Image (spheres, rainbow, N blue to C red):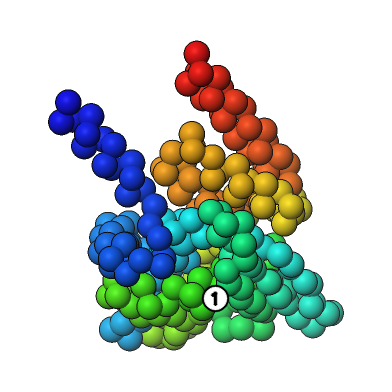
Amino acid sequence: MSTENEKIVKRKVESYDISRSDETLHLATDLAKFIKENKLFMNIQGKEFVNVEGWQYAGSRLGILPVVEELTNLSDEHEIKYKAQVKLLNLRTEQVVGSGFAICSNKENGKKYYQEFAIASMAQTRAIGKAYRNILAWIIRAAGYEPTPAEEMDYMGRDEQPAKPAVAEAPKEQRPLVRPEAAVPAEDPDAKPATTRQKAEILLLLNNEVITTAEKEKMVSNINKLDTERADKAIAKLKKTIADRQSGAAA
């Protein structure tokens, strides 16, 4: 019987309430452990900055998930440039609780050889981090990290790398074009990113009680890498999973 009681207690703390200071302090402790164990931070000039996945984890534990509301192509013949606008949705109340926007350009240091989809994806990634920073910076600070998303500081990280002799430097074309967490699926670089409507539907489906915390976290961490086709498949799979589990529980 005690084992069953322990299981019930664990279910009750799967998510936190941002309005309760005692719960957010527990979240800060949980967040510090999660970020460290999964190495979701960058050390820049002796300070530790959390990657956007860490910010997304904090938000998901509070039931606050990002939706890319707008992605604007600001490119011209000399520059690839995108602006992304993100809003944060509280799944408990279905209200918007925050927002943020960011820009990425191939004129930035280290991004000269980025492909267009990578520039667009990084703009979205930065906007997500910015939106979370606006409302959750104090929780990240309480967890022991700098309250600025690492994606805003990555250029500083590259500047810190020791210079190498030109003769030993690999051709730039052979270097990775984009960090893994910012890329869309490599198998179809021409695919269109998932729409705002698709992402919103996925987030609402994830709020169903039959979806586990682990499943939510996995989907949230990859939601901005989905193209329209994969988003439709994800929606269909979530609906089927929910229907199967609900029918199984009722049987």
Taking the image as shown, residue 218 lies to the left or right of residue 243, namely left
Residue in the image at 61% along x and 56% along y: 94
The quarter holding residue 224 reads bottom right
Q: Position of residue 241 (x, y in %)?
A: 56, 28
Q: Quadrant of the N terminus?
A: top left
Using the image, determine if residue 154 lies above or below residue 210.
Answer: below
Residue in the image at 77% along x and 71% along y: 72
Q: Position of residue 48 (x, y in %)?
A: 32, 77
Taking the image as drawn, is residue 26 in sight? yes
Using the image, determine if residue 30 lies above or below residue 50.
Answer: above
Q: Position of residue 3 (x, y in %)?
A: 18, 30
Residue in the image at 61% along x and 47% along y: 204
Q: How many marks?
A: 1
Taking the image as shown, residue 244 lies to the left or right of residue 50, namely right
Taking the image as shown, residue 181 lies to the left or right of residue 71, namely left
Using the image, determine if residue 110 lies above or below residue 10.
Answer: below
Identify residue type, mark 1: Lys
Q: Name the residue carrying label 1.
A: 130
